[in-house]
């Protein structure tokens, strides 16, 4: 009997609406958003963004790709915004901090934000945060892949809620293609029928032996009764003696009472 092994995909176990736990697109989007919000925090911001992208992607390679796309896309967006906002102030020939100082109002706050993506006093973008983001993306992807392998091992060993146990010997033999004696439903049916027939034969033998024992006991009791009947004369006294242990005492009391009544008369 052939069996088909089914391995659920990430979409099947994701939850309502197909919210898959591992998704490269969601990893890129989440990494981009976190990097845009936390990039201004030295080392920690890019590291958190990269780790999320890698962890959500599901593997080492996908983590590296997702974090690289998210970080690279953010830096391209920052470069485009810098040309748009700081271009009139002389960017890129002028340093970013100097060009941002010429902005007024809301644009001045945007200039301060853009300044975190460039090396201080220059118009060159800092690539160190991008490297940190990609490195932590690889770490998150590696841990994600390791967790998936551990989960698959626990499910295969049947130890979801207990310690890891080795596979049963029957399962190992089945995987190796060995014959187990129950390869099909017909084999199971024949074994069940043979077991039922053996049970019926055993029950009939026990019933026969029990009936034979009962007959032997009945014959013995009848023989004892016949022997006792032949040795005792069927008189009234013997009949009364066999009625009970106190019948003889009562009979004597009645005879004694009748004798007293005759003497008084």
Image (tube, rainbow, N blue to C red):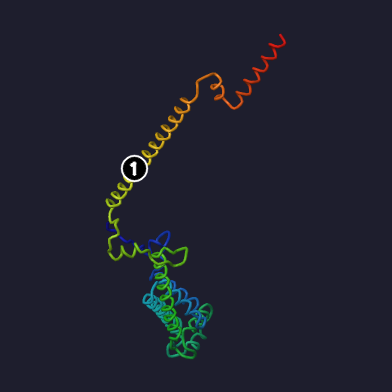
Vertical relation: 117 (above or below) 231: below
10 Å neighbourhood of mark 1: few (<14), some, or many (≥20)? few
Residue name at image x 33 percent, y 65 percent: 172
Task: Report the residue at 36% width, 38% height from top.
Answer: 208
Q: Which residue is mark 1?
A: 200
Image spot of residue 238 (x, y percent): 54, 22
Q: Position of residue 32 (x, y in %)?
A: 43, 75
Establish if 59 lies above or below 100: above
Q: Between 57 and 101, which is closer to the camera in this rendering? A: 57
Quadrant containing the C terminus in the rendered view: top right
Res. 138 image quadrant? bottom left
Q: Residue furthest right?
A: 264
Quadrant in the picture for the N terminus: bottom left
- x, y percentage for residue 254? 65, 18
54 in relation to 1, above or below:
below
Q: Position of residue 171 (x, y in %)?
A: 34, 63
Let me know if residue 28 appears in the view.
no
Which of 69/156 is in front? 156
């Amino acid at each position: 009997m052939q069996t088909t092994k089914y391995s659920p995909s990430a979409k099947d176990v994701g939850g309502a609406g197909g919210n898959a736990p591992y998704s490269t697109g969601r990893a890129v989007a989440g990494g981009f958003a976190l990097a845009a919000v936390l990039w201004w925090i030295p080392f920690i911001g890019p590291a958190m963004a990269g780790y999320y992208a890698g962890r959500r992607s599901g593997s080492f390679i996908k983590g590296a790709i997702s974090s690289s796309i998210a970080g690279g896309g953010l830096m391209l967006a920052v470069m485009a915004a810098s040309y748009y906002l700081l271009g009139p102030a002389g960017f890129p020939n002028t340093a970013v901090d100097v060009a941002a100082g010429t902005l007024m109002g809301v644009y001045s706050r945007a200039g301060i934000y853009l300044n975190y993506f460039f090396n201080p006093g220059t118009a060159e973008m800092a690539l160190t945060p991008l490297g940190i983001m990609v490195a932590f993306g690889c770490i998150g992807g590696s841990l994600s892949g390791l967790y998936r392998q551990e989960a698959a091992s626990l499910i295969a060993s049947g130890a979801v809620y207990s310690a890891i146990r080795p596979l049963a010997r029957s399962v190992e033999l089945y995987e190796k293609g060995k014959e187990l004696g129950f390869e099909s439903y017909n084999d199971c049916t024949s074994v069940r029928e043979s077991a039922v027939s053996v049970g019926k034969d055993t029950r009939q033998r026990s019933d026969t032996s029990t009936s034979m024992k009962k007959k032997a006991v009945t014959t013995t009791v009848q023989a004892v009764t016949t022997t006792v009947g032949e040795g005792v004369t069927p008189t009234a006294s013997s009949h009364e003696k066999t009625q009970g242990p106190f019948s003889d005492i009562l009979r004597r009391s009645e005879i004694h009472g009748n004798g007293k009544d005759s003497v008084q008369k």
